[in-house]
Amino acid sequence: MGNTLSARPIGAPRIARRALSFLALIVTVGGLVACGDNSNLLSPANSENTTRSFSVFALSGSPSALPAAYKFTSETLERPQVLSNGAVNFDVAFDITAENRVAILPVRVVVPLPPAGAPVVGLQRSDAAFSALERAPTRGYVNDTTLVVTAGQTVLVQLQGAGCFLGDPYYAKLVVDSIVVPERRLVVRSLVNRNCGYRALTEGLPKN
């Protein structure tokens, strides 16, 4: 009877400590996933980031045979159209405003009732120079709305629903280096990270 107080199962404190440690680990990992990049959960990158420079023409006032749009996932210039299979062939189109500024038009602005597969395009300005911008943010994008910028202003792009298996977005950046008004032509630089969910906007194979 004098040993009644020692009848508690041996090892219970150890089990409790292990449970608390495990719970703390779960909370820590959860916090890292929520606040960090979660890069370890992404598939290995297999597409290198490359800066490309190209000329594209204004959607209005240019011959219909000339490209006036860009598809980031294939990095190709296009004239906007709905294809025979019901898909669209571009992500953003370009135009020149009456004030000689650049209007960037997401696909859902140009095609108000887009066919299945048209991505949600988020745009936002950046104060950083194109070459200095190394990483895309996850917030601050305005979806499917025309963005008007001046030459030299860096633009961040987020593409949702553009083909990533788990629904991760693609990220990109672009800048209009010059506006050739008499030709209705824009000279653009762009870098697209074509690895699902990766946000690095520097050249080479991205790590995150």
Image (cartoon, rainbow, N blue to C red):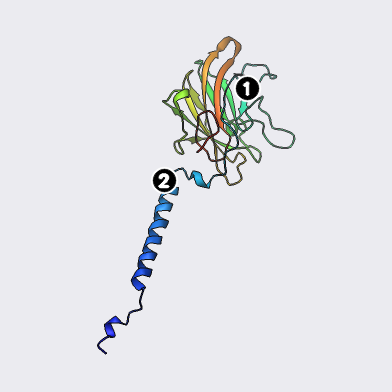
Furthest-right residue in this view: 84
Left or right, 40 with reference to 73: left
At 39% from the left and 53% from the top, the residue drawn is 28
Q: Nearer the viewer, mark 1 or mark 2?
A: 2
- Type of residue at label 1? Ala
At 50% from the left and 36% from the top, the residue drawn is 199
At 38% from the left and 65% from the top, the residue drawn is 18
**10 Å neighbourhood of mark 2: few (<14), some, or many (≥20)?**
few
Q: Is residue 12 above or below residue 151?
A: below
Could you say where residue 173 lies in the image, as x and y percent from the top left? 51, 28
Residue 57 in which image quadrant: top right
Could you say where residue 125 lies in the image, as x and y percent from the top left? 45, 28
Left or right, 103 with reference to 60: left
Camera-side residue: 151 or 16? 16
Furthest-top residue in this view: 182
Q: Is residue 200 above or below residue 41?
A: above
Q: Earlier in the sequence, mark 1 or mark 2?
A: 2
At 61% from the left and 27% from the top, the residue drawn is 70
Could you say where residue 192 lies in the image, as x and y percent from the top left? 56, 30
Q: Is residue 100 above or below residue 119?
A: above
For disc 1, the marked residue is 68
Could you say where residue 164 lies in the image, as x and y percent from the top left? 60, 42
**10 Å neighbourhood of mark 1: few (<14), some, or many (≥20)?**
many
Camera-side residue: 207 or 75? 207
For disc 2, the marked residue is 35
- Type of residue at label 2? Cys
Q: Secondary structure at mark 2?
A: helix
Q: Secondary structure at mark 1?
A: loop
Tell me the quarter of the image containing the N terminus: bottom left
- Work out how far the residue at label 1 is from the one at label 2, CA to CA, in angstroms: 38 Å
Furthest-bottom residue in this view: 1
